[in-house]
Image (spheres, rainbow, N blue to C red):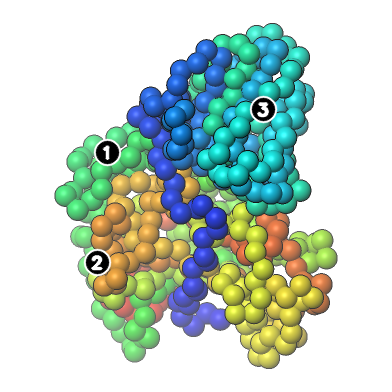
Amino acid sequence: MRTDSLHVAPPNPRTRRRVTRVALGAAVAAALGASGIYIANANAGETVVPGRLQAEAYSAHSGAQTQGTSDKDGGTNVGWLAAGDWLRYDNVAIGGTITARIASDNSAGGSIELRLGSQTGMLLTTIPVAKTGGWQNWVTKTATVKAPTGKQKLFAVMKSTQRSDFVNINWFTLGATATPGTPAATPTTKPATTAPTKAPTTAPTKAPTAAPTASTPPPNNAAGWVVMDQAKWKAQLAEFNAMKTKTITGNPVRVSEFNASCKYSHSKADDPIVLPGLPGGSHMHSFLGNTATDAFTTTDTLLKNAGSSCKPGEDRSAYWIPTLLENGKAVEPHGVTVYYGSRLKDPTKTVPLPQGFRMVVGDAKRQVATPKGANGQFWCGGIGGEIGRSADGNWPICAKTADLTFHLTFPDCWDGVHLDSPDHKSHTGGADSSGKCSGKFPVAIPSIAFVIGYSTSGSSAGFKLSSDMASSMHGDVFLAWDNAALGHRVKDCVVQKAKCDTFGNF
């Protein structure tokens, strides 16, 4: 595995319609515990109809995004829905009929299963989805159902034989007065036996204690945005600014860089960023770093647990990637170097990342071919390199002296206000055309990169990720460094443009 410098991989092209993420309207409530599981009510622009349940009024979801509708019914719809995605609505009363207002521009289609209690609970009805002629060409589908009386927990589960997004949902009518989802109590400990439907306590979401600077965007308190505690951030910055720069000794490579050297820790079908508090709700992930990482992970639990598969010990962060499968069996990385560096023209204004910072790079739903030379490609690191391709052309076959390798690069600019965002990406961005962090993302942060090595050469059969095709490779960071250790490395190695080792030495 190459460990000589901070390598830069080209970004993946975006898939259909994932151009922007439209924020919810003024009536959207705050994120439930700031956990990434969202609570929302109907937007002011939408028609109020007795028994109508707006699609975006979910209590929790997997895979959903919201956007404004373009017709007279107005308001917001939920889109980007594909097979396996789901929406959950708490405390709804269901009558004898259910109507769904949907749109699709996918000829393959699919269906929406409406179930009670869980994603696999009692099936009320299945709503077929066919192409309607456009993502904003709306039709209504009505079904007769038999549901228990009283308030229910309703799941809308997306089903399709293909993986592309296939439906937008504007609203449901339930034949009875629907009550928008209400927050559940936040658990303080893990339940002993049953899977939770409640979100855990996470990083603070209170409004900043100090006003942002003129160059820093104002906080967004809408669903899914996690606002940083500005008092804590100012204290961390004050500690960083007071640090004395270590004198460069020897003749280090003049590259802004230090690293954490990580090994595989454990596997779980958990994702504490995308699906917090929902164990088993994700595809399988291979976790690196903090040994306690699971669906209930918070900043506090990371900082309290000293166990880590990464060095140095001051790094208690959690890192994870989808599990690689060869002939149906998991192949875990023999090592992952997590680089912290800078790709900016001037790295001197780089500051440490705040505690509890979260971000995701890549797209688990991106399912496209990756022939040789394509973006999002696995490659062969080592002597001999690539000697062929799998039968489907999507995977390299490596020489016996080389290892299957992948490289993920995260953004190097930040909005300076949010620890997380609804899509876990929108609070970060790249440099402007002059190579500086500016505009919506004025704060320079270390650019994190994973270089992942697997002790396998591959074959004509290729591989598979737990998220499916090679193009769906993605990575997650949940940051929990000791402030002093991280601060000194940023000041000595990144700001001074000097390559450091795992322990911050030149």
At label 2, the amino acid type is Lys
Task: Rate crowding at label 3 as few (under 14), some (14 to 19) or many (20 or more) other CA atoms within 10 Å.
Answer: few
Note whether 8 is above or below 314 in the view shown.
below
Mark carried by residue 349: 2
> Which SS class for mark 3?
strand
Residue 107 percent location from the top left of the image: 69, 49
Q: CA distance from mark 1 to mark 2?
A: 23 Å
At label 3, the amino acid type is Lys
Residue assigned mark 1: 208
Residue sitting at x 64%, y 79%? 372
At label 1, the amino acid type is Pro
Q: Nearer the viewer, residue 421 or 68?
A: 68
Query: Of callouts 2 and 3, which one flags the residue occurring earlier in the amino acid sequence?
Result: 3
Q: Nearer the viewer, residue 56 or 360?
A: 56
> Which SS class for mark 2?
helix
Residue sitting at x 20%, y 60%? 242
Residue farthest to the top? 149
Note whether 184 is above or below 496 in the view shown.
above
Residue sitting at x 74%, y 84%? 388
Q: CA distance from mark 2 to mark 3?
A: 55 Å
Residue assigned mark 3: 141
Residue 435 percent location from the top left of the image: 29, 72
Query: Of callouts 1 and 2, which one flags the residue occurring earlier in the amino acid sequence?
Result: 1
Q: CA distance from mark 1 to mark 3?
A: 45 Å
- Quarter of the image with the N terminus is bottom right
Discs 1/3, front: 3
Tell me the quarter of the picture where residue 325 sits.
bottom right
Residue 151 percent location from the top left of the image: 62, 13
